[in-house]
Amino acid sequence: VEGYLAIADDMLVPVHGLKNKMEHTNNVWFLPKKQVRIGEILKLRECRLGMCDFYPHWSWWEVYRPAVIELFYSFTKLQQNSSIVHQCYQQLKALNGADMRPCGAYSDMYYIPKRLSSSFSQLADIFLDHQVFLEIAVPTIIQCLEHPDEVQPLDGKQLWELDRTSPWKYFTPQDLIGKNFLHPTKWSSLALRANDSLDFYCNKVIPFMHDPYARWQ
């Protein structure tokens, strides 16, 4: 086992789309760094291009603000006796520009190499103890452990702010060429035997994933 690949239950991952990552099993795989938010949690602002004066449209900053603040206060104490927490905290402050600045990003798919697995698990336990939201915890821990320039970006097709129940309206399976994932994939429509969903997944998406010839039709 080279590492740990986490995939949420509403993801569709064409295995052939991960082949180009197999040479980088010693690096973290996550979203491109431009898709990772930096939050100035005390003032509820976001940081972009070195400035932290943007109103955060991402609602999770406000919802989990108390938990994240409590987490950072605990970090200042824990780092005195934990080299992992100390190194994490120092790198996080250096990369994000100041104290009390966590990261945020969709965390439905990521890979942690074996060399970082123990540190990731120990830090994840601390974030869990403080009930920090997954999409703040995972990108923040990754920022602690791997420099953004070393992270292997996972390029996917996302259907945010669209009708997630009807993906066939917005793209064809060929849109997945070169992509690592499709998100979200709401399988409940298949359970309800919706004709459009059955046709889309059974006659287009599944052949695309398993038959190389179907990717060019």
Image (cartoon, rainbow, N blue to C red):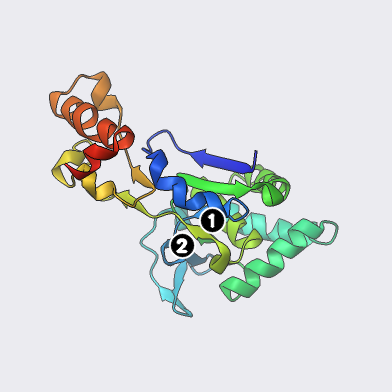
Image coords of residue 164 (percent x, y): 24, 40
* Residue 153 visible to the viewer: yes
Q: Say which of 178 and 94 sits in front.
A: 178
Image quadrant where residue 192 sits? top left
Residue 83, placed above or below residue 195: below
Q: Identify the residue shown where x is 19% and y is 29%.
A: 203
Type of the residue with mark 1: Pro
Per the rendering, the mark at residue 36 is: 2
Per the rendering, the mark at residue 139 is: 1
Image quadrant where residue 209 sits? top left
Q: CA distance from mark 2 to mark 1?
A: 7 Å
Dot 1: what SS? helix
Q: Are marks 2 and 1 in contact (CB under 8 Å)?
A: yes
Image coords of residue 105 (percent x, y): 45, 55
Q: Say which of 187 and 39 sits in front.
A: 187
Query: From the viewer's perspective, is 103 left or right of 58?
Result: right
| First of labels 2, 1 by sequence position | 2
Per the rendering, the mark at residue 212 is: none
Q: Where's the N terminus, which quadrant?
A: top right
